Image (cartoon, rainbow, N blue to C red):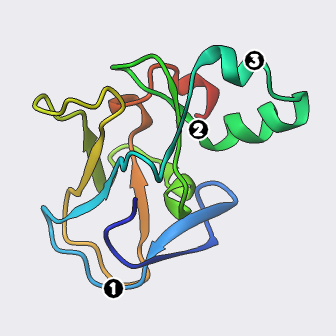
Amino acid sequence: MMLVRAKTGLSTIHSVGLFAKEFIPKGAKVWEFTEGFDLVLTKEEVKNLSEAAREQFFNYAYLSKKSGKYVLCSDDARFFNHQIPPNVTCRIPEESGIDEALECFAAKDIQTGEELTNNYEEFDADPSDVI
């Protein structure tokens, strides 16, 4: 779930991106997996989707390195684009009892209007699907 104000817009990185609607200071938590809000599907559940639904799903979901399940952000966080270096870094918290847990923090001060980016390789077990 997004923890800062952001909006979608045209991206120079890849079609649609996510942009800060407010100043985000370095170290601020930007996003976190929220059980009951973000969607988690097993590989079998994804396999049972229609071909068209699977194609859309893979556009926005990531494969959790910890659980091996797919996670789909239920908000505009799905529009983070991949960039190295990113301005938002993500990590799997060690102390979490939730296998899909992920949290993302501003790696630097992010200005209003700046595109929010992350490095998919930090959390996605199969980033080649989306890079």
Q: What is the x, y in percent for residue 59? A: 69, 41
Residue occupied by mark 2: 61
Outermost residue, front direction? 36
If the image is split into quadrants, where does the N terminus sit? Answer: bottom left
Q: What type is the residue that disc 1 sits on?
A: Glu
Question: What separation in Å lies between label 3 and label 1 (alpha carbons)?
Answer: 39 Å
- 97 or 16, which is in the foreground? 97
Q: Residue at x 58, y 56 (%)?
A: 13
Picture quarter with the C terminus: top right
Up-down relation of residue 81 to residue 12 (above or below): above
* Mark before the other along the chain sequence, 3 or 1: 1
Q: CA distance from mark 2 to mark 1?
A: 25 Å
Q: Which sits in the foreground, 7 or 68?
A: 68
Residue with the mark numbered 3? 47
Q: Amino acid at mark 2?
A: Ala
Residue occupied by mark 1 = 22
SS class of the residue under badge 1?
loop
Q: Position of residue 12 (x, y in %)?
A: 61, 63
Q: Nearer the viewer, residue 31 or 84?
A: 31
Q: Quadrant of residue 20?
A: bottom left
Badge 3 marks a residue whose secondary structure is: helix
Residue 118: which numbered mark, if any?
none
Would you say the residues marked 3 and 1 are in contact, meaning their CB atoms lie under 8 Å apart? Answer: no
Which mark sits nearer the N-terminus, 2 or 1? 1
Q: Do the CB atoms of the residues marked 2 and 1 lie less than 8 Å apart?
A: no
| Nearer the camera: disc 3 or disc 1 | 3
Residue at x 56% of width, y 57% of height: 79
